Image (cartoon, rainbow, N blue to C red):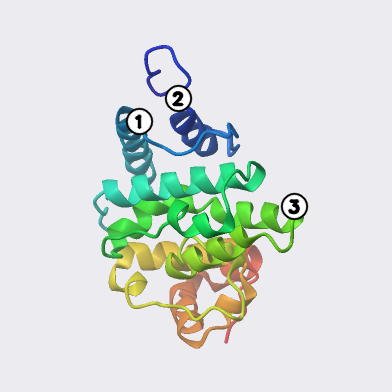
Amino acid sequence: MPEILNNRRSYFLDTIYSVRNDEKLLLFNALPITDLQEQQLVVEFLETEFTNEAYDYPFHTLEFDKAAALWAARYLYTTAQLLLYRTYSVEQLPMLLAGFKDDLTPEAILSADLCLRFLPDLFDLANKLDYSDPIQSCIVSTLSIWQYSGIKIADATLTPKLEIIFSNPCLKQLYLNRILETDNPYLKKHPVIQQELSAIAGIYQTFFLHNYNYEKP
């Protein structure tokens, strides 16, 4: 468990720790996030998580992007709190769920994914609670930019933006792996992605057919 802050409840840190270790979101109705020490502890925790995951990454390991990881953690935490504790107006959502201001790089994509990978589940929850909830459009808009994290809910309306993802062999392989793991029918049929999946299948095509419902183009 991350360090406790002066024997007081650290809502932000506790939530990120819980979602990363137990895949459970804690709801506190505690906004906004202002404690700098707590944010630093979240970054340190996520950097450790990134390092642990990187052991299994293909090719060369990418550097941890602290800014992207913290932004994504804040975004996930805020979205979760707003789903059930709507104390802010719809007009305030763009401010509370502001986008990432730095460049979108392979390092940023993988660092942010530590938390953004849980957004599709929040999208499903929002859909069940209230089909017209405006938070859904915020999540979809965010995942249309951070497409690696949104593979699970990508549909026919999404235009894959592959330039950055395919610019790095590590991220490219992880992206293709996740498409197969989530069995996304729309992305698997995209011409460029289908070609790449066919290439990596190669002699392991039987394995892909059996485990990932992979269809040879």
Q: CA distance from mark 3 to mark 1?
A: 30 Å
- Is residue 83 among the parts visible in the rendering? yes
Total numbered labels: 3
Judging from the image, what secondary structure is the residue with disc 3 in? helix
Residue at the spot x=31%, y=39% of the render?
Answer: 47
| Snapshot quadrant of residue 130 | bottom right
Type of residue at label 2? Ser
Q: Are marks 2 and 1 in contact (CB under 8 Å)?
A: yes
Type of residue at label 3? Leu
Q: CA distance from mark 2 to mark 3?
A: 27 Å
Type of residue at label 1? Asp
The label number, if any, that marks residue 10 in the structure image: 2
* Label 2 CA crowd tier, 10 Å (few <14, some 14–19, many 20+): some
Question: In the rendering, at what x and y percent does residue 2 appear?
Answer: 40, 24
Question: In the rendering, at what x and y percent does residue 185 appear?
Answer: 64, 75
The label number, if any, that marks residue 129 in the structure image: 3
